[in-house]
Image: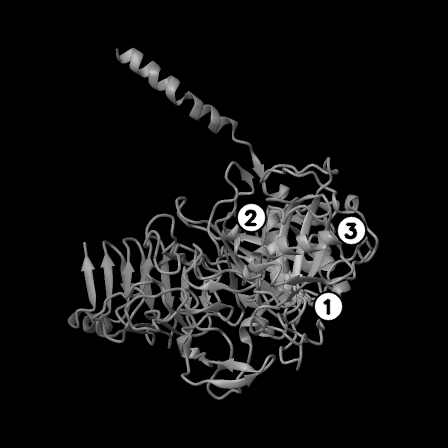
Amino acid sequence: MRILRILFLALTYLPLFTAAQERPMQESKNGWYLSPHGTIRILLLFVEVEYDVNREKDPRPDGADHWPKGQLPVWKDNVFDPQVLPVQQAMVSRYYQDISLGNFTVLGDYVDEVIHVKESEYPGVSNAHGIGRFAVDELNKRGSLKTHHGLSIADFDLWKDGGKQGLPKERGSDDPHQYDHIMVITRNSGLPHGTGSTDGGSPGKLFGYGADTQSRFGGNNALPFEILKHEFNHLLIGGNNFHSGGGNASQFESYQLCLQGGWSMMGANGSSLLTCSAWDRDRMGWRPEGATYRIRARSMGGHEVDTDLDPVNGDTGIFVLRDFVTSGDALRIRLPDLPESGYQQWLWVENHQGSHRNGSPTDQFHWEGFGENCITPIEPGLFLQIQIDREERTGTNIFSGSADYLRPVLANGSHDLYLRGDTISWVCPFGGRSFPYVLDPELANPFTGNHEQELPVVDRNGDGKLERGEHFPIGTRSVKGLEVVHNVGFGRPEHAMRMNGVRKIGMCTNPSTANALTLLSTNKREIQGVGGPNVRVIHLNGIAIELQAMDAKGDAHVRISTNDTRMASDQRWCADSIVLPPLRGVDGHSLTVAAGVRLRLDRSRAATRMTQVDPDAQGGPWFSEATRLTITSGASVFLEDRSELVLENGSELHLLAGSRLILRPTAKLLSEPGTRIVQHGNCCIEARNKVLRKLRKQGRLVKIP
């Protein structure tokens, strides 16, 4: 019977095993619904709703300068070019030529009239995302397709329908023909400006032909570029779990507590730079013609070199990064010591020269050059982002994962930011309101603080819980003694490493080259608490990135090194757990606090949890754990004369067996009430006896066998 039972089970599960084995191998370079390679041509429909039943519902009854009532928009020819050009001229066509390094060409043409959809004839017109069906029904009354450049259905059918996610898409026409993509932009529908959607369906048959994919957008105020490219890029990259770079929303499962800005193909209204990221290009398989390596830059001798780097294992040296947009050069640095079961992380480095130098219209800050020119233009420099997880480009499940997998690392660091409490009116570029936030240098926090391209969360309703939607926008920066700066979240020159600004970052700077903490979460809850694959430990690594030079062509000379362990400026470290491994700097120590420099171990006022921690702790409410710095076996910390190591707000310093803490005679070790220093095993503290006796008497220096 046992043999028969085993045989029965084997036969029962065999189809499941077979199905798993037959699951196709996907590749991200093949795209999701559409291929990100080759050429596609889009049919564009401009729509105006006639509110002949409920006139009060018309959001734009009189039209606007950019789109007069009853006419096509002024920018109708600036969406797509109809044909391939050496340098595409229309905004969207040029965007894809630039970000894809010429690998993907997006063309288009529009029906040469505005399509009037009457509310009385199409009662469902208030269903904003169904507007495409009504536009097609109305246009079918014309009898035949008439585009501005006289194109036919064959010109819009360059790919066969039925492409599978992650599998190669077949070029050629369908039989019968189908439009590869129909896009609708409305002047005054229920779609507000900056909103839209896309899917792999058809709005119905237009002159007898269906569509492979479709999209629809509100163009109330201008060409809806940000949402247009965001939604169309979904068809290339994947679903809502690929929101990043300023395109995410509170409700989506994300790797990080705070909504991230930055730059990405999946960015939208919250982006800083309008171009793509190096992660995007890697995901799409966009490489320069003739490139050898997946991620690449140049040696000092001008040769292509592999720059997917693991510095801890010897990948160090000086690399030449040409302009990212035009060359595709980038560095990617693996961040070490993360547990295999945790989300792995990499630090990307890109050299952005800006549109005024490389000619790319989207290599600029959001709203740069718009209206009153109140956005300070981009300056040439290095722009950095951390990649969290999302390394699966080939496999059977490459479209899974969570959103906000890119975290900008800004050269002006991270801080415990907080609202000033007042409101400023009539802030450019649109004359809106701004809620100033305070950036206090004393609250610098490289590991768990907020940077200026994310949305910090605060407990607005005082219920002891955080929701991602309880954020405040990064608008107006207030620093004591300085003039306020507006629209900071859209990008600032000081966010980049520059020759006239921050030129080096490392373990002992703000920002740091350490990994980021993760907190897999939705709007209202932590999905796995601090467990699972979440990374809840800051691993100090000694990696340094230095911008050594930038020549007249804009080529950046970047040095990547290890064992950079000297702290030369005051720092404040906050995190649930910080671990110092046995690094060896030039002086032989794992961490050296230079003469006159103070290192504070403090508790983060920026949230790292969604629920209140230690409700009775002084100084709260706290949405973070007290900081714990662990000096591991074989590691040594050296405090030079007149330096200080200060423990505040419940922080702890743990010296594991085999570690050393060495204080020069005039160095100070200060432990405030509620903090403690814990000695494990045969660790060693070399300091004046008077200092150690005082700490023991206060109960702030304890020894564990």
The residue under label 1 is which amino acid type?
Answer: Pro
Foreground pick, 380 / 582: 380
Mark 2 vs 3, N-terminal side:
3
Spot occupied by residue 144 in the image (x, y as percentages of width and height): 78, 50
Is 576 displayed left or right of 565 in the figure? left
Closer to viewer: mark 2 or mark 3: 3
- For label 1, the SS is loop
Q: Horizontal and vertical percent for residue 178?
A: 71, 42
Q: Is residue 401 above or below residue 630?
A: above
Give the CA separation, mark 2 to mark 1: 31 Å
Q: Nearer the viewer, residue 263 or 74?
A: 74
> Where residue 238 is drawn, which disc sits there?
2
Q: Residues within 10 Å of mark 1 (few under 14, many from 20)?
A: many
Residue type pointed to by label 2: Gly
- In percent of the image, x 34 and y 19: which residue is there? 9
- Residue situated in front as seen by the camera: 192 or 641: 192
Say if residue 398 shows up in the picture.
Answer: yes
**Which residue is rendered at x = 54% and y = 75% of the image?**
488
* Residue 609 in the image: above or below residue 7: below
Disc 3: which residue: 145
Q: Residues within 10 Å of mark 3 (few under 14, many from 20)?
A: some
Quarter placement of the C terminus: bottom left
- Sequence-earlier tag: 2 or 1: 1
Q: Which mark is residue 73?
A: 1
In the rendered image, which quarter contains the N terminus?
top left
Tell me the amino acid under the disc marked 3.
Leu
